[in-house]
Image (cartoon, rainbow, N blue to C red):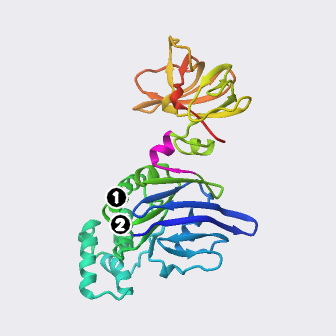
Amino acid sequence: MASVELRGLTKRYDTLAVVDDVSLHIESGRLVCLLGPSGCGKTTTLRLIAGFVEPSAGEIHVGSRMVSSPARTLPPEQRNMSMIFQSYALWPHMTVAENIAYGLKLRKQSRDTIAKKLAAILATTKLGALADRYPGELSGGQQQRVALARALVVEPETLLLDEPLSNLDTNLREEMRFEIRRLHDEYRYTTVYVTHDQSEAMTTADVIAVMNAGKIEQAGSPEDIYERPRSEFVARFIGSSNVVSGKNLDDSRISFAGLPLRCTGAKLAAGGTTAVSIRQHAINIRAAKPQQTENVVPATVVRQVFLGDSRDYMVEVADGTQLRVITSAEESIPRGSSVWLELPPENCRALMG
């Protein structure tokens, strides 16, 4: 295992920077998710780490080795990395055991060593009973486990995964998220995992790096990214926060819907305008006006949907701003009703931009 460090990494195609001055330190044995929408640069970043793409600027270091720079790029086969693609890329004419052992044979390991490593990885990935089957005889989840086993058995310094669950159905995706995390906890390879799925990132990652337009907007633990977003993009992309804005009244309050709204997360600049994120589940809807007045805003219910274990409301405040609110299913407030919204100051996060 080794750490991976990106230093000012940039990849341009003509004048377009698809990866734009990205710096990120990945500690040895950690699993980092590059998370973002299509076109944000996450897969290109992974391909740069793998050595399939040469950087326009910046460097990639693995442990003490510099493996990429504009002047010199180490080829993929010399990086001691394993990569898992969306398509799994299994040999259809080889059995499960043959697919998994293929990398060991290429490395000219002894027959006894191959047998021992193969038996161990088959047991760990729960594929022992399928060892003699061919990929066409396996389910999508089983094929994904074979791809993981093949990548892990060669003991790479770094494991790279490019949208590995995108071809699975919803139930299998959920199951495989936990399987990937279980295998990571067992082997502790330094891992870079690309996904556009927030749930995958939250389930599997030690660190999430949220990417947008070729840059890393914010990197931190899943809890930090979710609870303390720093930008409007991160707040909207992770957890679909409501984002409102208003003129700053003082160093901790903005004007929202004609009322003061106290927020946390940053000291506000006098005379400026600030965007504030509020999670949908952090807002309380009251049919009766609360006794406290701070961060209480009148609104009207414009939509209400019953979701079984919760209700999904859309409410509108005096200035026309609409907020989405998720509540428990117990109390049903009809469309058109006047309500009061409690917006707890600790859940109103001032954003940097």
x and y percent of residue 24 in the render? 55, 60
Badge 1 density bin: few <14, some 14–19, many ≥20, Cα 10 Å: some
x and y percentages locating residue 83 in the rendered image: 46, 71
Task: Using residue 199 as the reference point, say whether residue 211 is left or right of it.
Answer: right
Marks 1 and 2 close (CB-CB < 8 Å): yes
95 left or right, relative to 70: left
Q: CA distance from mark 1 to mark 2?
A: 9 Å
- Estimate the x, y position of residue 126 in percent, counting from the top left: 26, 65
**Which numbered circle lies on residue 145?**
2
Residue depicted at 65% across the width and 35% down the height: 275
Q: Point out the tag, 1 or 2, that comes first from the N-terminus.
A: 2
Q: What residue is shown with label 1?
A: 179
- Amino acid found under the numbered disc labelled 1: Glu
**In this orientation, which residue lies closer to the viewer: 324 or 120?**
120
Task: Return the residue found at the far right.
Answer: 15
Disc 1 versus disc 2: nearer the observer: 1
Return the residue nearer the eye: 268 or 301. 268
**Vertical arrangement, residue 201 with respect to residue 79, above or below:** above
Q: Residues within 10 Å of mark 2 (few under 14, many from 20)?
A: many
Residue at 46% from the left image edge and 21% from the top image edge: 332
Q: In percent of the image, x 35 and y 89: which residue is there?
A: 108
104 up-or-down from 166: above or below: below
Secondary structure under badge 1?
Answer: helix
Mark linked to residue 246: none
Answer whether residue 257 is magenta in the image: no
* Span highlighted in magenta in the image: 218-227
Task: Kindly identify the amino acid type of the residue bearing the numbered disc 2.
Answer: Arg
* Residue toward you, 166 or 152: 152
Q: Quadrant of residue 296?
A: top right
